[in-house]
């Protein structure tokens, strides 16, 4: 115990009636002697600390008894489809962009939005060829930036392109909440959310706070990516989000000279995982259309020949079932 406490204890002992003449100070094992009044004060502090711990436990129990947060729809959004992956770098953001473009191309009367929920590594601004800061409405809501007919919102619009986001979890969750609730989406038929990789706080918070029509899991065929994709699918099942199916990306490389096709990462890894999980294969990369740059991926010409053969019927069926 620090020197200040002992000096305070000695001063308290001197102020007691009969101090210095009668009662012998009490010695604590391994420490200096203190007067009975000081010992009583110190023991009272430990008692109050114990009662404080009990109060904290009671408060935690009351919070846990409230259960999970109630899901609240995003204002103006009819259906939400999330695109996720257990592993980073498997083409999840590219898939999310193409799903949004495919939904818009399937029916020009439908309004589609794209939300980049990857706070640390936002990719949507680059993929959708967008720059700038969102404007604010009179209600202090952010207006999404728009390109190719898709309304987009991303953390990348709020920071410099090369600026890292060095935040702890609470700040990240606050940013996700603002992207969900403080954006003027207008009236959207579909909102595609590009989730960060993994099964952490953001995935759990999004799944528990808004109603989701379904999730699409993206993976490459190699074993390491498949392990994490399996975990991602199981996470959505645990939080009662329907998994629409799997997308196999980067499965085939076609030589630009001889057109020979090589399965660099294997051929049927995602297909085998889909059988294990009892899910559908929504699409896989087309060997004849290997995109090499961002512009080709996000140009309007890719609406005719998507790099991924997405089964739009599965997505729309899941969304219609949710509506009915």
Image (cartoon, grey):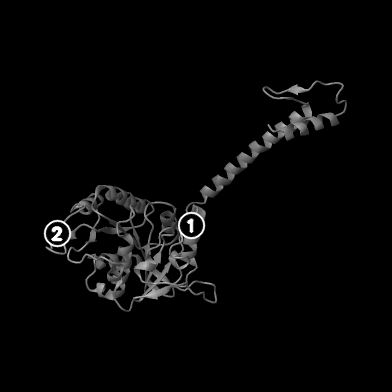
Q: Is residue 117 left or right of residue 275?
A: right
Residue 209, how many percent across, how many down? 45, 59
Q: Is residue 141 left or right of residue 220?
A: right
Q: Please identify the quarter of the rendering in which residue 52 is found.
A: top right
Residue 178, how many percent across, how many down? 49, 64
What residue is pinned by disc 2? 261
Q: Residue at horizontal 36%, vertical 54%?
A: 236
Residue 271, how many percent across, how many down? 21, 54
Q: Please identify the quarter of the rendering in which residue 22 is found.
A: top right
Separation (CA) of disc 2 from disc 1:
42 Å
Q: Quadrant of the N terminus?
A: top right
Secondary structure category for the residue under label 2? strand
Furthest residue in direction bottom, as rendered: 109
Circles 2 and 1 in contact, beta carbons < 8 Å: no
Q: Quadrant of the C terminus?
A: bottom left
Q: Tell me if residue 103 can be seen.
A: yes
């Amino acid at each position: 115990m620090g020197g200040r406490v002992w000096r305070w204890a000695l001063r308290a002992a001197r102020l007691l009636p009969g101090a210095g003449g009668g009662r012998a100070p009490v010695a604590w094992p391994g420490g200096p002697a203190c007067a009975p009044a000081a010992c009583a004060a110190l023991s009272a502090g430990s008692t109050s600390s114990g009662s404080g711990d009990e109060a904290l436990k009671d408060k935690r129990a009351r919070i846990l008894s409230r259960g999970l947060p109630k899901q609240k729809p995003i204002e103006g959004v009819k259906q939400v489809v999330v695109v996720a992956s257990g592993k980073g770098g498997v083409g999840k953001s590219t898939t999310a962009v193409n799903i949004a473009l495919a939904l818009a191309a399937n029916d020009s009367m439908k309004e589609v939005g794209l939300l980049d929920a990857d706070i640390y590594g936002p990719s949507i601004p680059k993929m959708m060829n967008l720059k700038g800061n969102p404007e604010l409405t009179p209600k202090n809501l952010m207006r999404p930036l728009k390109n190719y007919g898709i309304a987009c919102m991303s953390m990348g619009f709020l920071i410099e392109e090369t600026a890292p986001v060095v935040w702890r979890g609470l700040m990240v969750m606050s940013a996700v909440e603002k992207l969900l609730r403080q954006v003027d989406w207008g009236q959207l038929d579909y909102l595609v959310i590009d989730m960060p990789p993994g099964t952490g706080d953001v995935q759990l918070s999004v799944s528990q706070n808004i109603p989701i029509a379904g999730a699409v899991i993206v993976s490459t065929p190699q074993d390491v990516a498949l392990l994490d994709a399996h975990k991602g699918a199981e996470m959505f099942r645990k939080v009662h989000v329907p998994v629409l199916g799997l997308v196999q990306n980067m499965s085939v490389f076609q030589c630009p000279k001889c057109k020979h096709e090589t399965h660099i990462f294997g051929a049927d890894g995602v297909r085998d995982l889909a059988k294990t999980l009892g899910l559908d294969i929504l699409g896989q990369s087309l060997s004849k259309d290997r995109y090499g740059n961002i512009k080709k991926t996000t140009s309007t010409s890719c609406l005719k020949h998507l790099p991924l053969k997405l089964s739009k019927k599965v997505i729309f069926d899941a969304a219609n079932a949710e509506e009915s």
